[in-house]
Amino acid sequence: MKPIKKRLLTPGPTMVPERVLEALSRPTLYHRSPEFKEIFLETRKLLKEVMRTEGEPLILTSSGTGAMEAAVANLFEPGDSAVVVVGGKFGQRWEELCRVHGVHPVVVSVEWGKAVDLKDVERALSENPGVKGVLVQICETSTGTVHDVRGIGELLKNFPEALLIADGITAYGVYDIPTDEWGIDVAITGSQKALMTPPGLAVITLNERAVNRLVESPKTYYFNLKKELKQQQKGQTAYTTATNLVVALNEALKMIVEEGVESVARRHSLLAEATRAGVKALGLELLSNSPANGVTAVLSPEGVNGQDVVKVARERYGITIAGGQEHLKGKIFRLSHMGYVDQFDVLTGLEVVELALKELGYDRFNFGDSVKAAMEVFYSSNL
Ligand SMILES: *Cc1c(COP(=O)(O)O)cnc(C)c1O
């Protein structure tokens, strides 16, 4: 049977709800029109609600990395130091961005798949007085690991000079994160993950402390956050934003608010729990010791290359899951369950994993084992 439906179970871009696609297809608005200004201001308000912050959300026209770069370029001076948690591909990105912008990275190295040990962060801070910030992922997507950012926020009470800058690109819209309460000064997210919108927009929020730290002339013309802030407070952007995407994001955020941020988080927690139960029922293990609720990284069984699982799923069944990156390539595959995902998507993802594994010669399970385990989780949850 040839696949006639394409399903996206990757950790970004993710599936986009019909309602958001409809919004995306509306006629393009002029970015300086009163009509768009109203939508833009409302979108900023919705972001504050979903991200639970009183800070200033800035919507940038770029993928998530653009917001990460904007953070490094606008909140540090060349020569400053920052503690960087590196436990995967995206932690590495923070480190690389620091180097590009002349910021000295004090690297807290974490084995890929492990959550950072708070003691290591504390040591890095104590041994490097004057550090201006801590750069971390809330969820390290490449390993499906959630870090204890709340704990880092607690630690930073003793290091008031350091801003907490959290990449929450696969955390916002997955978890209910009280950004301000956790002491996150700068939070970052992007449109194409749990926010259920196509790729192309990034978000960076700044609390008052962060606003006061914005440098006067950052070494970037396009991502000048001081300039953006001034414009965005008025419902404008410094340059032409992707107006159709903003309209789509507005719709997606309304969907999250209507479902309720807490309910959205509960749904993700359940989807993740069912996915974990499903793969374990196949005799497989998770990569992470602190598995995230947006994406599950699964160790490929002995003798099976994780990339082949991905290939069979896509080519034979039309279902896109993700492989591993760098040294994890071939060793893992990743099933995403963030954004516009329900229990039936999870069951489909598990089924395709079963089919691919059988085809690739791993057969220490019976068809349906993973689905059964996942269904039991769903059935007993009463959600
Ligand atoms: C997807 C992602 C990013 C941003 O990647 P882009 O391709 O630039 O959107 C950054 N951090 C994490 C944790 C991510 O999952």
Image (cartoon, rainbow, N blue to C red):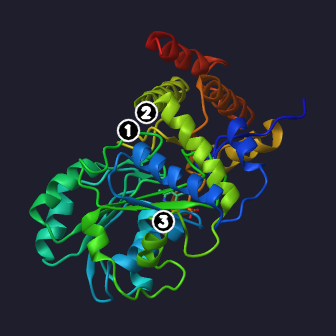
Q: Earlier in the sequence, mark 3 or mark 2?
A: 3
Circle 2: residue type: Ala
Please name which of the two marks, 3 or 2, marks the residue nearer to the observer. 3
Mark 2 in CB contact with mark 1 (< 8 angstroms): yes
Q: Residues within 10 Å of mark 2 (few under 14, many from 20)?
A: many
Q: In the displayed structure, does residue 62 sit left or right of residue 58?
A: right
What is the distance, in whole Å, between disc 3 and disc 2 at their CAs? 31 Å
What residue is drawn where x is 44% and y is 46%? 172
At numbered mark 3, what does the secondary structure look like: helix, strand or loop?
Answer: loop
* Residue hosting label 1: 176
Circle 1: residue type: Asp
Mark 3 in CB contact with mark 1 (< 8 angstroms): no
* Residue hosting label 3: 234
What residue is drawn where x is 50% and y is 25%? 274
Q: Earlier in the sequence, mark 3 or mark 1?
A: 1
At numbered mark 1, what does the secondary structure look like: helix, strand or loop?
Answer: loop
What residue is drawn where x is 43% and y is 73%? 230
Taking depth in this image into account, of 215 and 190 the one nearest to the observer is 215
Percent from the top left, x then y, of residue 264? 47, 32
Q: Which residue sits furthest front? A: 34
Q: Earlier in the sequence, mark 2 or mark 1?
A: 1
Taking depth in this image into account, of 259 and 349 the one nearest to the observer is 259
Percent from the top left, x then y, of residue 214? 33, 77
Circle 3: residue type: Lys
Residue 284 sits above or below residue 215 on the image: above
Residue 275 image label: none
Percent from the top left, x then y, of residue 13? 64, 51
* Residue hosting label 2: 265
Residue 18, quarter of the rendered image: top right
Say whether residue 96 is visible. no
What is the distance, in whole Å, between disc 3 and disc 1 at their CAs? 28 Å
